[in-house]
Image (tube, rainbow, N blue to C red):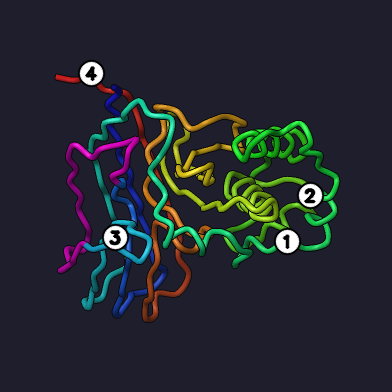
Amino acid sequence: MTVLHFEYQMEIEYEENVGRCYYTIKCIPREDARQHLLGMEFSILPETEHSIGEDSFGNKQIYGCETEPHRQFIFHITGDVEIIQTDYEEEAAEEKTGIFRYPYGKCMPGPGLLRYYESCDFSSCGNSYEVCVELMHRLHRDFTYESGVTHVHTTAEEAWELGRGVCQDYAHIYITLLRMAGIPARYVCGLIIGEGASHAWVEALCGSRWLAFDPTNDCLVLDHYIKLGHGRDTSDCAINRGLMWNGGAQTQKISVLVEKRERE
């Protein structure tokens, strides 16, 4: 078993005072067959009353409200996660798979992705797992990683037409293709060693289990990944969501560290 230590910090600077701010932060690692949270601690500045709960997908979230004027918001979390040597994320619950079968949000196919899917040949694939692997390899070959050309609101079809993008775009396109193939798929947000920022990958339902694929790196998810949350697309598991009054322009700085730790 592997133990991963992680640190995540988000710092937001506002041009003007924020009079009131409601926030939701989804940055607590999930518990599943592949990983176990050993411990964590977090801080929020300005100090606010907050609660911890779960959303409708089972993602852990911290939510609260700051009513005093402020021009800076800092969230920091650190902890350790035990990675368990399994080849799947979790057993599928039939009543929870339906919403991951159909086009949704940023994972809606347009003419470009429809043509691309129709060009795929799965005749050599004997099961859904082999279809997932074939599509992952094809996407990695036919799409180019390049930062700065897409943004958080870019859809799968828009990214595909551009021909390049980042991990969020790879995940959205891959999910769209898998759902077209009749395979339920969900977007995953998490952290990995060496990235320096959050990362996105995909879980697909193969038989009765969810398996994890990283189309950006063209590989299966291994023991250097920490899962934070999943959903139908990135909007369901975004790390930071908020509503604020005033504040003007803002800048955001994210820092991430993930490293292996020896078990004591």
For the N terminus, which image quadrant? Answer: top left
> Which tag is nearer the camera, tag 1 or tag 3?
1
Q: Which mark is residue 61?
A: 3
**Residue 47 against residue 79 in the figure, above or below:** below
Q: Is residue 149 visible?
A: no
Circle nearer the N terminus (4, 2): 2
Q: Which residues are magenta?
A: 31-52
Q: Which residue is mark 2?
A: 117
**Residue 186 percent coordinates (x, y):** 52, 53
Mark before the other along the chain sequence, 2 or 1: 1
- Contact between marks 2 and 1 (CB within 8 A): the answer is yes
Crowding at dot 2, Cα within 10 Å, few <14 / some 14-19 / many 20+, comes out as some
Q: Earlier along the polypeptide chain: callout 2 or callout 3?
A: 3
**Residue 109: mark in rendering:** 1
The residue singled out by tag 4 in the image is 262
Q: Earlier in the sequence, mark 4 or mark 1?
A: 1
